[in-house]
Amino acid sequence: MKNPILEAKGISKSFGNIKALDDVDFFLEKGIIHGLLGENGAGKSSLMNILSGIYIPEKGTLTINGQLIKRLNPDLASSYGIGMVHQEFRLIDSFSIKDNLTLSKSNIYQNDFSEAFSKYSDIFALNLNAMTPVSELSVGEKQKVEIMKLIFHNSSIMLLDEPTAVLTPQETVQLKESLETLSQEDEKTIVLITHKLKEIKDFTETIYVMKNGKMVAKDLDTKTVSDTQLIELMMGEVKTSKFDKNNFKGDTKLEAVDISFTNEQNIKTLQNVSLEIKSGEVLGVAGVSGNGQVELANIICGIIKDFEGRVIVKTKDVTGKGVKSRKKLNLSYIPENRLGVGLAPGVSVLDNSAIKEYFQASFGPHLSKNVLLNSLNDLINKFSIKAPDVKAEISTLSGGNMQKLLMGRELISNPDVIIAAQPTRGLDVSAVDSIHNLIIDQRDKGSAILLISEDLDELFKLSDRLIVMYEGKVITEIETELATVENIGLAMAGINE
Amino acid sequence: MNKFLLSKKLYRNELATFYSFLIGFLIAIIVGSIILLIQSKNPFDVFSLMLKLSIGSVNSLSNSLNKAIPLILAGLGIAIINSVKLWNIGAEGQIFFGAIALNFVYINTSIENSYLYIFLLLASGFIGGSVCILLPALSKVLFGVNEIITTLLTNYIVFGLTIYLINGVWKDPNSLNFPAAAYVSESVYLPTVFGKLSSGFLICILFTLIAYYIKDKSVFGYEMRIAGGSALTAIYAGISAKQKAFIAMLIGGGFAGLAGAIELLSQTHRVSTGISQGFGYTAIIVAAITGMRPLGIFLVGSLFGALAIGGSVIQTIGVSSYISDIIQATTLFGALIAQFFFSYEIKRVKDD
């Protein structure tokens, strides 16, 4: 490293018992685009929040332009020229583009706004009047204004947290060109945070990789580093513990035929996806999140109805029908988003425990509280859930107990088909084990299981077969016995041999 | 340096809402007393007179309960709509529209059997309330328009309509130029059951039980709770949150419309601006104080009815009737603040 503009050494930060950052080093060089790669929860955003003064680290030193910084705060960070674009937009919707760009006191284009605006509009290919209210902009245009805001606030170090997550492929290419111009002409130092391998190789000159709060690789040269190397760094080691895979497989219980879907932003999130799962079989879906897994699950479960293709549950074609048609065929869905989708916040444990089959406790318009209470007690005993007060809000339960309640609720009817999305994310080791046992148990009882996960360890342990999704397509399908971290990882990066 | 953090309590006392009400009421009495003292009145004398003249005799008690009927019914409607986390500020308009719908049906029909006729008229009041909230309900579920604004604005439209009708097409030629529609025939007056207590109060009890059943014991109430808790969970569960919101609004509007019908058939006997004296707004206070619980609404509504009667009679000793408005409003303030402290706690954390 020749001349670092920013040096972070030995940074550590914990939230409660979770170590978000553990002795992390990070260096930035002037005028260069740096890539920061890592899975969800690897600590990328925490590190950026420390550099922009939002979080205070417990340990470590920060040096900016050779000057040791004692204690950074957001104001100070911006005076050192550090600016960040967060994943969620921080624009004022009812204000014009101009007002948003010039809002800060550190704004440098007070008098020559229009020249500066037209210059950077060219760089960003933004064809808009500066007086347009931000609320009228598309998501991609808002993203451009967010990045322009950093320039107008005189940021020389630009931290961009997953800027491409909301962009179409064409917009992503455009963004790449804009950032290159900024780094070359304006000597901006840029950090691009992403979990997409392809982008990090396209955009950057040097790459840092994080895994579980640690910096596992520093200052890799983008030109010479291989995809395989990056994937191994990002995924880490996969333990080879596996459940017995001599399970009996029966008839096909779930079939998805040639499914394509275009979302509201007009992005094709699924393209010709087909899959088939037999009774007693676990099909694992690997892939970096955001490659169409959520949409696929929502289509199979009847939440999204306007898709192309067909969904067949137990030989019945349920295409175009809603959630209840699937419930009647005993399909269960454990959604990725536990509190907010699977469970309703602010509603009691008792009410939440009945969401799948509350109508079974009904007699005409009457809902029997006793039936609900009895089924809940069943759940509590069978799945050893700790719920001290069933009339209290669901958020009084711990994360593990919430997931057990959700899993129990969906599994107690011994479903024919189970869709489980990230069932163990954020849980501690013992909770993970018990959830894995529940899934295998259910497999042996004859359920057809679709397991969507980002955790390769989990997928290898539980699945009979694996498919890998990339940009809405099934890029690889393979028996788990033949799968290796390398070939799955490459497929996750969109490379198919 | 120490910092203070507000954090939500995980467990809430089941009777917290009731205690909050008592605390709020106590604060209100204290505030009321201070105001009376400033006016050099003895609060004890004033309040004991209020008590005596609002619940001290069969007549005054029945007056109080009659006053409570529209508060309770409109409050129940607000509580049903709030099950899906929506606010009905339009109960006042729905009360008037219930009375207008009743009068419309009364003018255009004639039924010999007066019980049957009364039933028909009450039903048209209920339907009138539903019709009144139809536009806000449709614009909410179709276009996501904020229901607080639309229900509030509907009040002004309906009030204008009332003025138009009683000064125009429905104006009673025998009213000596007082703007009011003609009286309905005595045969459709709601009979009294006890002193001056209208049989509307029995309807009120019945509808309290119905509202309680809908909210706490029915499948529909369950689906409303889930839809109110999280729209995404409702979609996931196959519950149409919009459909539940729409039906809840129509039922809630109907409750307020029924209040207007009962008011007409038992008190005013004709459409006039006196159909409601802000009952629809006071009902919001009643519903909010009780945390939207039907049985609580029945009790607090009855108390507020008595307060209104007590407030109007103390004018005879030179005390403004606004003292009862002050007590009602301060009770809400006090109760909401007390509820806050039952739900949240202030924690001291060490800044690192």
Image: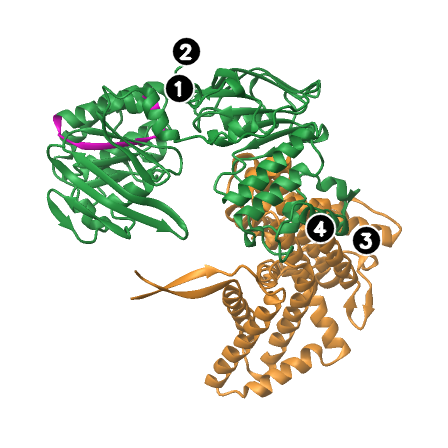
**A13 on left or right of B235:** left
In this view, the mark in front (1 or 3): 1
**B25 on left or right of B251:** left
Q: How did the renderer colour the structure?
A: by chain
Chain letter of disc 1 in the image: A
Chain letter of disc 2 in the image: A
In this view, the mark in front (3 or 4): 4
Question: Same chain for the residues at labels 3 and 4, yes or no?
Answer: no
Question: Same chain for the residues at labels 1 and 3, yes or no?
Answer: no
Q: Colour of chain A?
A: green
**A305 on left or right of A483:** right
Residue A416 is situated, as x and y percent measured from the top left of the image, at: 69, 28
Cα separation between marks 3 and 2: 81 Å
Chain letter of disc 3 in the image: B
Q: Which mark is residue B83?
A: none
Residue range (magenta): A185-198
Q: Earlier in the sequence, mark 1 or mark 2?
A: 1
Cα separation between marks 4 and 1: 46 Å
Residue A373 is situated, as x and y percent measured from the top left of the image, at: 72, 51
> Which residue is rendered at x = 34% and y = 27% of the image?
A164
Q: Which mark is residue B118?
A: 3
**Circle 4 is placed at which residue position?**
A377
Q: In which quadrant of the rendered image does the N terminus of chain A lie?
A: top left
